[in-house]
Amino acid sequence: MTPSPRLDVEVGGIRLKNPVILAAGTFGYGAEYAAPAGAARLGAVVAKSITPFPRPGNPPPRVAEMPAGMLNSVGLENPGLEGFLRDELPRLARLGPPVLASIAGETVRDYLYLARGLDAAPGLAGMEVNVSCPNLARGRIPFGSQPRPLFRVVEAVRSATRLPVWVKLSPNVTSIVPLARAAKEAGADALCLINTLTGLAIDIERRRPALGAVFGGLSGPAIKPVALRMVWEVAEALDLPLVGMGGIMDARDALEFVMAGATAVAVGTATFVNPRAAVEVLDGIVRYLKAWGLESVSELVGAAHPGAADRRPRRGAREPRGLEPAEEGDGG
Amino acid sequence: MQWGEQAPGRPLWRQVLGRVLEQRQVGPNSYLLGLQQPWLAEAGRPGQFVHVRCGQGRDPLLRRPLSLFGVDPGEGRVELLYQVVGRGTALLSGLRPGMDVDLMGPLGRGFPRPPDGEGLCLVAGGLGVAPLVPAAQAWGAGRRVLALVGADTAAELLPEVQRRLVEAGAEVQLATMDGSRGTPGPVTDLLEGAIAREADAGRTGGWVVFACGPSAMLRRTAALAQSAGWPCYLCLEARMGCGVGACAGCAWPAAPDRPGGRFVRVCRDGPVFLAQEVGWWE
Ligand SMILES: Cc1cc2nc3c(=O)[nH]c(=O)nc-3n(C[C@H](O)[C@H](O)[C@H](O)COP(=O)(O)OP(=O)(O)OC[C@H]3O[C@@H](n4cnc5c(N)ncnc54)[C@H](O)[C@@H]3O)c2cc1C
Ligand SMILES: Cc1cc2nc3c(=O)[nH]c(=O)nc-3n(C[C@H](O)[C@H](O)[C@H](O)COP(=O)(O)O)c2cc1C
Ligand code: FES
């Protein structure tokens, strides 16, 4: 027997027992999926984004199926800071893995308010800053679309908390690197990418947009190539831990993100399809590490980049067997 | 068919495999899928649903919600009744005996037991009849059950459904939009007639309405039931992501005066709601 490979990683000041995270907004606040999704075994969980005060969210319909993906316009439906601290965080904290709160706002003051309000919250390991929200001061252009506003938001959050700050980048930009750099310069401890890609679907029978809010965010396998490209670009440009996500359905997808430069990965939409997706990703990563005789998952971070050529299997090395998941049993 | 009562609180759901026992066409586009699945057969209640993975791959991606149509806890068997309307349901119709389907359930808050002695009036539009048959089976004994069943055409009125309703002791009245069978027009005309007959007989109240079907039909049903003073429960449909209350994708407007938020979640707070709990859009 080879010894079990090391799975623990450090992401921007938070130690994770393994690199698999549940992505913001895709498992609520833990009540629904905790047991079925095996949340206790995961590296970390990121709660659904909260705003300073409760928000009802967008008019229905809020989801539409897309080719190998989904479009959602949930619209930050959330119980607000107070409701989160009172009703949701205690339960999340009991799951076991480190909990990050995800914060979202329409003004820099909103972010400041949230960062201050969460700074001393018991059971909170860090904050993820969701910058995909419209910036009221800039004609509703999202904070995450322009380096200056992004810098100001992250700087504000950084100044208001001693907790680790992860910044979740929006892919709806012409070039991701300047934004990643702005977040880093403002004090981000890690970067998470990507959030959903803004999209539209039209119902031709009803002759109107499929979603009540017109636009929605595209997630799922359809966005994986875009997400991977962005993780790769940021990994080439800066030295900061990255959390990769976008369309991860299984361990192969997750390993692609790791090899593109992500220290950890997050599973989102896949949980809806298979509540056990995240733990199956974890198990698959372990199988891969064992099959290739690797000592630690960290050895694979960025392994596909040109500079890491020495970390590749030798020419002619054959892929070891046993990477595919075991035959699925009764999931109950 | 033996149905138990739903305990209060969040339903305990599991992700399970169901082995296909039977795939039977019961109408032009409609199928009955029989599955070996002891947990769902044991735990499923009228009005609850399962979230079904329709294919193996990544496209179509999301699961599809389908109501429990039949359970037999003794045999460990459950049944779904579905209409092929798109890619997911088309894939389901390709399942053959011996194959396995990945299901999550039972999910949602189903119908409540109607008070003893009260009549049960079922109002069904199209495949909306699927969750109503279980209500008749569970609570039909010892009370009057009036099943008002509507569809676009005679072909869409499924004999299998009518047989089960009659077996459960229901009086069945039919309506079709094109007049090819039963009363011509919407099924809500039958409800209007039933309410008028009760009023003529000098009876008020004594009935509970359970309805499922297209949103316009439900809205009209709720209005008629309210004017008659009959309590009315609606089984709603919404596009779903997770199906378990985690994603907020299945929002439905709450009644304007309802405390606790502008939207309810069909998968978790419903799919069955007291008519006064919900509002309407479009
Ligand atoms: C709680 C619940 C219980 C249901 N029970 C049954 C049932 O017992 N039998 C049955 O035949 N159908 C039922 N439905 C509807 C069923 O979920 C949809 O018909 C199915 O998801 C369509 O999938 P598709 O891939 O075949 O079609 P798609 O290609 O996704 O869509 C085809 C058409 O179906 C409509 N549709 C898609 N998803 C839904 C949805 N979730 N709700 C309503 N309309 C939808 C679309 O608007 C479109 O017009 C239920 C829905 C809900 C929410
Ligand atoms: C229904 C839904 C809700 C989401 N809510 C949030 C949110 O509140 N905050 C956030 O930062 N990201 C949110 N996301 C984005 C996901 O966290 C993730 O970045 C994205 O979906 C890409 O990953 P995936 O393809 O694995 O889902 C949401 C995604 C979905 C599908
Ligand atoms: S479908 Fe996800 S909350 Fe209802």
Image: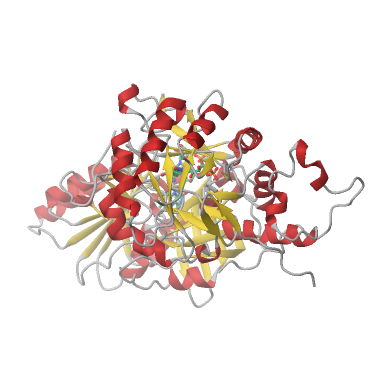
The percent coordinates of residue A193 (x first, y second) are: 54, 39
Q: Is residue B146 above or below residue A64?
A: below
Does residue A277 show up?
no
**Residue B9 seen by the camera:** yes
- Taking A82 as reference, is B93 left or right? right
Residue B18 lies, with reference to residue A54, above or below; the image says: below
The N terminus of chain B, quarter of image: bottom left
The furthest residue to the right: A316
Q: Is residue B179 left or right of residue A260?
A: left
Q: Residue A59 in the image: x percent, y percent? A: 32, 37
Residue at 32%, 67% (x, y): give it: B9
Question: Which corner quadrant holds the C terminus of chain B?
Answer: top left
Which image quarter: residue A210? top left
Residue placed furthest toward the bottom:
B74
Residue A248 position, x and y percent, is 60, 47
Vertical side of A91 occupied by A117: above or below: above
* Image point (25%, 53%), residue name: A82
- Which residue is painted at 22% across and 64% down in the image? B119
Who is closer to the viewer here, B62 or B234? Answer: B62
Q: Nearer the viewer, residue A133 or A147?
A: A147
